[in-house]
Image: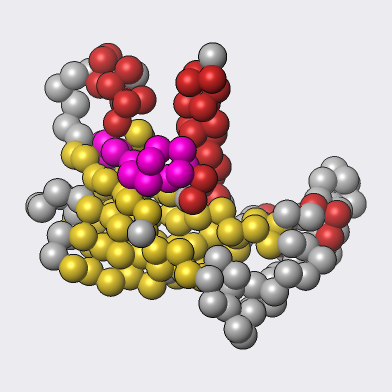
């Protein structure tokens, strides 16, 4: 049961990262007359970097774009929408620093990039978009929790579907979509904590 629950936590963490990545656009609720989501304050003395290494195989992803993502930890700091009563919150995305060495990409972000204000901004990890010749071929994510749960290394399979490219954990893919469609075109990437 512990293994099963650990897998569910890992998948949920991966889905949370993917959801944060997908929500980077402004929403209709940000129009005039609606309460605005709080914005964090930059920490001028940020000093706690997190670096991960992303390695796609040669010839599958010629470029990576990545963001470091934060969400509000203290929901009561956000205003409520007048009709629904839901807290007005939007994730915050900042470009990660990317350095390439051979086939590997090193992504770095400061986990204390924002001051610890009333909202308690929480670093949720990296959102990673893989491109090949300008075409999106995969979307993945990683955070400290998922990396620790997997011994510091994630094995991921990406499916460059022309409509919705995506990436999933390799062991999950082997039990799901690869079993249903074993000839599906996929490519592996590894994500490692540094």
Q: Is residue 122 above or below residue 15?
A: below
In this rendering, position of residue 104 left or right of residue 30: left
State the image coordinates of residue 147 (x, y, percent, origin top left). Answer: 43, 45
**In the image, farthest residue toward the bottom:** 44
Is 167 placed left or right of 42 in the picture?
left
User: Horizontally, is 123 left or right of 172 in the view?
Assistant: right
Task: Report if residue 134 is visible in the image.
Answer: no
Q: Nearer the viewer, residue 10 or 188?
A: 10
Q: Nearer the viewer, residue 117 or 177?
A: 117
Q: Residue at x 30, y 65 (%)?
A: 106
The x, y position of residue 63, in whole percent, is: 23, 62
Q: Please say whether residue 188 is visible from this viewpoint.
A: yes
Residue 34, quarter of the rendered image: bottom right
Q: Which region shows up in magenta?
A: 146-161
Q: Which residue does the image show at 35% across and 35% down from the upper left?
A: 168
Q: Is 150 part of what is drawn in magenta?
A: yes
Residue 111 point in image, percent of width and height: 55, 66
- The residue shown at (56%, 53%) is 124
Location of residue 113 with respect to 93 vertically, above or below: below
């Amino acid at each position: 049961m512990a293994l099963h629950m650990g897998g569910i936590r890992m998948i949920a963490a991966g889905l949370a990262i993917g959801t944060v990545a997908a929500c980077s656009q402004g929403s209709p609720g940000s129009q005039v007359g609606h309460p605005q989501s709080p914005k964090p304050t930059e920490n001028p003395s940020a000093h706690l970097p997190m670096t991960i290494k992303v390695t796609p195989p040669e010839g599958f992803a010629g470029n990576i774009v990545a963001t470091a993502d934060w969400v509000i930890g203290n929901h009561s700091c956000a205003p409520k929408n007048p009709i629904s009563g839901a807290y007005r919150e939007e994730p915050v995305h900042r470009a990660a620093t990317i350095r390439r060495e051979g086939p590997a990409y090193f992504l770095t972000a400061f986990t204390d990039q924002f001051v610890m204000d009333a909202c308690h901004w929480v670093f949720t990890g990296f959102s990673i978009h893989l491109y090949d010749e300008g075409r999106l071929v995969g979307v993945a994510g990683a955070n400290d929790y998922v990396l620790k749960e997997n011994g510091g290394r994630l094995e991921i399979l990406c499916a460059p579907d022309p409509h919705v490219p995506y990436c999933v954990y390799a062991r999950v893919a082997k039990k799901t979509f690869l079993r249903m469609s074993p000839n599906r075109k996929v490519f592996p990437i590894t994500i490692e904590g540094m």
